[in-house]
Image: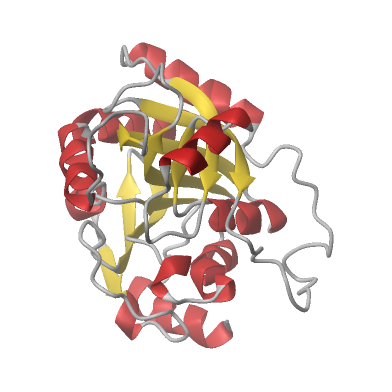
Amino acid sequence: MKHTIDYIKTYTDDFQPEIGIVLGSGLGELADKYQEYAIPYNLIPKFPRATGIEGHKGQLVFANIVGRRVVMMQGRFHYYEGYSMEQVTYPIKVMKELGVNTIILTNAAGIVNKSFRPGDLMVITDHINFMGSNPLIGKNDDKFGVRFPDMSEVYNKGLIKIVDAAGRLLNLNLRHGVYLATTGPSYETPAEIKMARTIGADAAGMSTVPEAIVANYCGMRVIGLSCLTNYASGVSDKKLSHAEVINTANEVKDKFTALIMMILQNVK
């Protein structure tokens, strides 16, 4: 970890971020617009190597946005790429070491709740870990958190109120819901989505939950936001594709960016 932090600081000097953002598929334009320092993942010691997934640029970006010091992951690592859970969540621990106390996790997700529509933004209120693993398995590092961390409020309720207020100011119809994470890379079957709906999920995806678990474990406040890009399998007759995910994310990127900006202005 020290080698990673020391290397990053050779780029950023005394820049100490207070807020972290993980930008999901098709949502990386915010980093392009405001970046002051950008470090490709491939150069950072102990970071996994970016695999070039469309919509994921693969760099760590530092910026001042509306007076807030921010570090952004422009693209994330996924369990389905063959990385271990430790590798997937390593950047979250790096953010903690850099000084981040609040993190905004974003993703593109499929719609499970039939009352939601493509292009909606959903505030994650809770999650279901259906990935068959947990990023905290293994020897515990007491520097970051306790062996058995509480998960009763992974997504900070006080911050959800701030997100809702920002949405009202921007006239956005923000949805609230539970995010279910599977490993991917195949999309879920109609039967799996029916099960997800039965157990209380509103959206489904292949990321975010490991990062949220580790951020909460590290004592960071978590905001989760899903861009609902498509109906999950069986919700409509349409075949699923990553191209649809990227296209919808691009269509809503302006309101997503506006929401992030408003959140940054109001989070204390």
The quarter of the picture where residue 55 lies is bottom left
Task: Tell me how many marks there are.
Answer: 0
Q: In this view, does 79 lie above or below 268?
A: below
The quarter of the picture where the N terminus appears is: bottom right
Q: Residue at x 32, y 60 (%)?
A: 75
Res 32 seen here: yes
Q: In this view, does 115 lie above or below 54?
A: above
Q: Which of the two residues, 58 or 30, is positioned nearer the viewer here?
A: 58
Image location (x, y in percent) of residue 32: 19, 54
The quarter of the picture where residue 198 lies is top right
Image location (x, y in percent) of residue 216: 67, 51
Image location (x, y in percent) of residue 22: 41, 53
Q: In this view, does 35 lie above or below 142?
A: above
Q: In this view, does 234 lie to the left or right of 142?
A: left
Q: Residue at x 47, y 44 (%)?
A: 104
Image location (x, y in percent) of residue 180: 54, 42
Q: In this view, does 149 lie to the left or right of 30?
A: right
Colour convention of the picture? secondary structure
The quarter of the picture where residue 259 lies is top left
Q: Residue at x 72, y 66 (%)?
A: 144
Q: Which residue is drawn at 25% across and 53% down?
A: 31
The quarter of the picture where the C terminus appears is: top right
Q: Is residue 209 left or right of residue 116?
A: right
Q: Which of the two residues, 3 or 185, is positioned nearer the viewer here?
A: 185
Res 100 seen here: no
